[in-house]
Amino acid sequence: RFADRGAKSSRDFGGKTFRDSGGKTSHEPGMVRLSIRLGKEHGIRPNDIVGAIAAHADIPGAVIGKITIHDRNSLVDVPENLVGKVLSKAANAQIRRQPLELQKA
């Protein structure tokens, strides 16, 4: 029944196939994955990340893509055309009184 689904590392979305690259690149076209040195151990939640990035970079939170929170770090996808703005404006941002430390994954 499930034999035609293919491997877990590859998914088909409307004729386009996106492969899991181990978390370093975005799965979504037009998005860039950024890394944050804060995670579950720091009490970080997705809305903390969206709020900090959106407020400091002055972008709508709705344009922020997938967020993955690990124990010690988090990954967030942002539109390719806004990466420079996010990286420069969020340099002084904090989440839960801790520096955001945002960089390309």
Image (tube, rainbow, N blue to C red):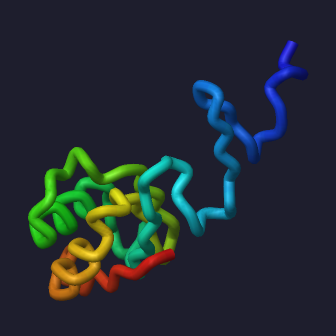
Can residue 98 be seen here? no
The N terminus lies in quadrant: top right
Q: Is residue 64 left or right of residue 26?
A: left
**Residue sitting at the far top:** 1
For residue 31, what is the image quadrant? bottom left
Residue 34 at x, y = what percent? 42, 71
Q: How many marks?
A: 0
The residue nearer to you, when weighing 10 against 47, is 10
47 vs 36, left or right, is left
Q: Looking at this view, is 84 or 6 the one in front?
A: 84
Q: Position of residue 88 (x, y in %)?
A: 22, 83
Residue 25 at least partly seen: yes
Q: Residue at x 32, y 70 (%)?
A: 83
- Looking at the image, is 79 positioned above or below residue 88? above
Instruction: Tell me where residue 97 sits by quadrant.
Output: bottom left
Q: Residue at x 67, y 39 (%)?
A: 17
Q: Is residue 19 above or below residue 88?
A: above
The answer to whether residue 75 is above or below residue 89 is: above
x 44%, y 63%: residue: 32
Residue 4 in picture, x, y percent from top left:
85, 21
72 vs 23: above or below: below
Which residue is located at x 12 percent, y 72 percent? Answer: 56
Direction from residue 1 to residue 56 in the image, left or right: left
Question: How far across and how far down the image is residue 93, in percent?
Answer: 17, 80
Could you say which quadrant of the image residue 2 lies in?
A: top right
